[in-house]
Amino acid sequence: MVGILKNWVNDSLLTVEEIDSFYESQNCAPKHRQSTEPFPAGRAIPGGFVLDLTAGEE
């Protein structure tokens, strides 16, 4: 995000209108890329893992 903001400042794009106008004139409006690979929901949990919420309590 910081890199994008620095690029805008370097291109003297200081308002939203200037940014929109720039991208329209360049015909390269930023597009969201969709990944073809599934995004992992978190760390892989080992198969034998058992969650014991009382572990460590005496």
Image (cartoon, rainbow, N blue to C red):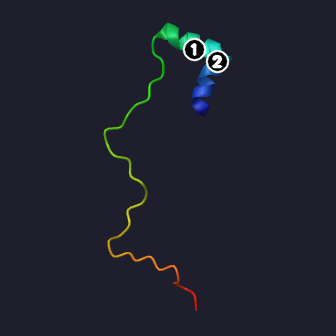
Q: Secondary structure at mark 1?
A: helix
Q: Please state if 37 lies on the left or on the right of 54 as rendered.
A: left
Whole-percent x, y for residue 55 in the image: 51, 84
In the rendered image, the vertical position of residue 52 relative to residue 40, given as above or below: below
Callout 1 amino acid: Asp
Residue 50 position by quadrant? bottom left
Whole-percent x, y for residue 2 in the image: 61, 33
Whole-percent x, y for residue 9 in the image: 65, 20
Q: Which residue is mark 1?
A: 20
Identify the residue shown where x is 42% and y is 60%.
Answer: 43
Residue at the farthest right position: 14
Marks 1 and 2: in contact by CB < 8 Å?
yes
Label number found at residue 10: none
Q: What's the distance in space between the residues labelled 2 and 1, CA to CA? A: 6 Å
Residue 36 position by quadrant? top left
Residue at the farthest bottom position: 58
Q: Which residue is mark 2?
A: 16
Identify the residue shown where x is 38% and y is 75%.
Answer: 49
Q: Secondary structure at mark 2?
A: helix
Callout 2 amino acid: Val
Residue 56 position by quadrant? bottom right
Residue at the farthest front position: 53
Whole-percent x, y for residue 18 in the image: 63, 12
Identify the residue shown where x is 59% and y is 22%.
Answer: 7
